[in-house]
Image (cartoon, grey):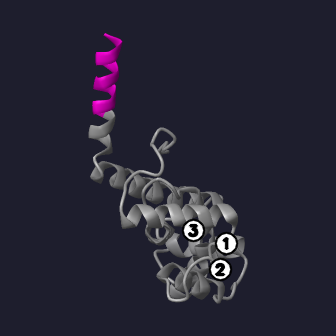
Amino acid sequence: VSIDLSGLPQNMGTGESARRLREEEQLIREGKLLTGLEENDPLRLYLEELAGIPAAGDLNVLAMELAEANREENFDEGLFTRILNLSLSRVVEIAKEYVGYGVLLLDLIQEGSLGLWTDLECYIEGDMEGFLDRSIRRYMAQAVLRQARASGLGQKMRQAVEDYRMVDE
């Protein structure tokens, strides 16, 4: 199942969170995400910590081992952690694509990481990178839709359609 977010308006809202959303979007567009944030910013601290995690193995080899472990229902925490560590940078890359839809980047990363973590437990076979990308994107899209619903987007769109109909009539 794929969730299409192309119809959602971007850069909604006012106030402090809207300012932060615009700031994150600009930093990503300029390619200065890490350097443009303050020293003690939680997003910067997370990205610096993520950069310090060593790559521990080949994802395809680890995927085969994980598939075997999941089929046998034999949970290997070390293997699980290595795959998570290899995949967290992909979560950040995908999260950058969803910036501008009303959800802070750190929240998108959290949702994508949750999707990664949850769906890894179900992996049995196939293209691991594609599997992980779909899981990450699905959870991020759900977060964007929850935020849009919470901000009253549905009601705003309904009102806009009603206004359009009145003008048209």
Q: Amino acid at mark 3?
A: Val
Q: Which residue is mark 1?
A: 32
Judged by depth in the image, the label closer to the viewer, 3 or 2, is 2
Q: Where is residue 139? Give x, y as percent.
A: 44, 59
- Describe residue 66's horizontal placement relative to residue 3 as left or right: right
Q: Which residues are magenta?
A: 158-169
> Mark 3 to mark 2: distance in Å?
19 Å
Q: Residue at x 53, y 66 (%)?
A: 23
Q: Residue at x 35, y 50 (%)?
A: 148
- Residue 35's tag is 2
Q: Tell me if label 3 and label 2 are in contact, CB under 8 Å.
A: no
Q: Where is residue 47? Give x, y as percent.
A: 58, 81
Q: Which residue is mark 3?
A: 91
Q: Tell me if label 2 and label 1 are in contact, CB under 8 Å.
A: yes
Q: Residue at x 34, y 54 (%)?
A: 146
In this view of the protein, which residue sits in the foreground, 102 or 71? 102
User: Is 162 part of what is drawn in magenta?
Assistant: yes
